[in-house]
Amino acid sequence: MTRRCTATTRTFTAGAYGTERVVHDPLTGLTHRAGTEVGSGRIRLPDADVASWLEIHPAAVHADEPISVCWSPLVRCDLTCPHCLDDKSVSELARSDRRRIAHLLAESAVLGVDISGGEPLLLRELPELIDILVAGGSAVSVTTNGTHLARRVEALASRVDAVRVSLDGPDAERHDHWRGTGSFDHAIAGIRAAVAHGIPTQIQTVLLRSTAEASVRPMIELAAALGLHGVTFLQMLLIGEGARLAGDEQLTDVEATDLLADLTTSSPVPVRLRTREAAGGFTVIRADGQVWRNQPGAHSITSLRPLRGVIDLALTARDGSA
């Protein structure tokens, strides 16, 4: 579910699949069926126009490769969040291999790459990796905890198409409970810096049973006060270290939808809910260079093969993907 009220023009990517033309939004990660004639590749479009176009699950598009991927080139992080999606036992490839994977993605038909982690801003070569992806025609977003965003924002501003900052509470008391003392202030400083540099920015927050009801509306109000492009509420996934919290903290998709229902029409900023169902079938490239795929319903994630060539991104029947 999504609602937008911000009138801006920013970068998207468009591609043709048979007779269907779709647009990928690097800020939200959503795929839309183009509502008018658009070109291919990286294009500038009005935010409100794209938001009004039909949202479709990428699996509904008959593509040979994923529409978008999440690339987690490292597992290192300066925080230790208990609901982290990462498996810290996954090894990290060398810098030269990260560059190789960036070039492979640039050669592919993938429209959007979200660089995540771990904490991607710990990578010194992050600007170089973004440049490679953009040169190949992808829209690029970075998902970060925000701790290092203020000091790295100048290098990102001329490169990245969107930034998604993870928050677990609308104030220091609630956020720092999960992420450590001082993490909220660092994240807010990073968000303010990204906005000041003109980077399309949104908050992402994982819905937890113990905090969701009290935090949802204040989180939306915080996003509005910071001048952000919106908030995406993420359903907790049974993946990585966070799986051990599922019994106590996981909401059903129905509960999450009901929780946010009235806010989709009354929110001062765009609001989106990513259900577990919507996360099913999504492609992840982890730090070990393996292609992973969320299983239907995102109840687990399966390692498929090493990413040695573009062909290894292929969506095939044996992957359980469309």
Image (spheres, grey):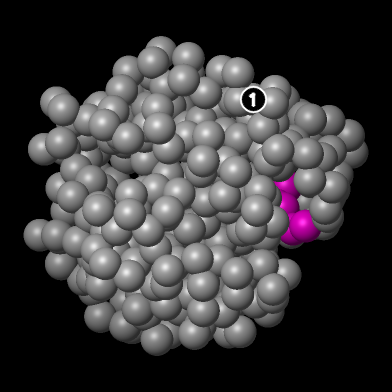
**In the rendered structure, which amino acid carries the disc numbered 1?**
Thr
Image quadrant in which you'd find residue 192: bottom right
Q: Is residue 205 depicted above or below 139 in this figure?
A: above
Q: Which residue is mark 1?
A: 264
Residue 14 sits inside the magenta stretch: yes
Question: In the depicted view, which residue is nearer to us: 268 or 64?
Answer: 268
Q: Is residue 245 above or below residue 181?
A: above
Q: Which residues are magenta?
A: 10-15
In the displayed structure, would residue 107 be above or below residue 173? Answer: below
Quarter holding the C terminus? top left
Q: Is residue 51 left or right of residue 88?
A: right
In this view, the residue in front, 23 or 271, is 271
The image shows residue 136 at horizontal and vertical percentages of 62, 68
Q: Residue at position x 77%, y 29% from top?
A: 53
Q: Residue at x 77, y 51 (%)?
A: 40
Residue ID at (35%, 78%)? 122
Q: Nearer the viewer, residue 153 or 191?
A: 191
Residue 74 image-quadrant placement: bottom left
Q: Is residue 257 magenta?
A: no
Residue 194 placed where, x, y %? Answer: 61, 71
One can see residue 237 in this view: yes
> Which quarter of the image is occupied by the N terminus?
top right
Residue 100 seen from this side: no
Residue 276 in the image: x percent, y percent? 37, 27
Label count reads 1
